[in-house]
Amino acid sequence: MIVRIMGEGQRMLADSHFAELNTLDDELLKEMEAGDGPGFRQTLGQLLDKVRELGEPLPDDALEPSELILPSPDATLEEVRAMLSDNGLIPG
């Protein structure tokens, strides 16, 4: 699956990594619902770091459609809330 981090580019991730990412996504959703700004900021950073760690960067000139788009590291709670579905940022 191709994942885009806004402002950073795309990474190719194996489907096998999504259980681990979903755990962080679930925590992020709980923090957002509780209005926990510091917790949200920390968990968003952990989620993006995990995508960077597990994903293989695509070349900057690659024009592949992103199957998942994640917010930039400096996104606000309100900006991320606008991107959410009922399941969080990551489907499933």
Image (tube, grey):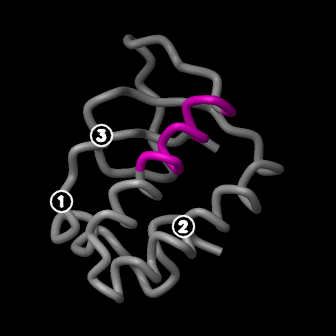
Which disc is residue 25 wearing?
A: 2
Q: Does residue 58 lie above or below 50 as drawn?
A: above
Neighbourhood count class around disc 2 (C-alpha, 10 Å): few under 14, some 14–19, many 20 upward: many
Query: Where does the image place residue 3, in percent across and percent down from the top left?
Result: 51, 42
User: N-terminal of the two: label 2 or label 1?
Assistant: 2
Q: Tell me the CA gap for discs 3 and 1.
A: 13 Å
Q: Name the residue that disc number 1 marks.
A: 76
Mark 2 lies on a secondary structure that is helix
Neighbourhood count class around disc 3 (C-alpha, 10 Å): few under 14, some 14–19, many 20 upward: some
**Which image quarter: residue 35?**
bottom left
Q: Tell me the CA gap for discs 2 and 3.
A: 16 Å
* Main secondary structure type of the part rendered in magenta: helix
Mark 1 lies on a secondary structure that is loop
The residue depicted at 63 percent of the width and 29 percent of the height is: 53
Magenta part of the chain: 45-54
Labels 2 and 3 touching (C-beta < 8 A) = no
Labels 2 and 1 touching (C-beta < 8 A) = no
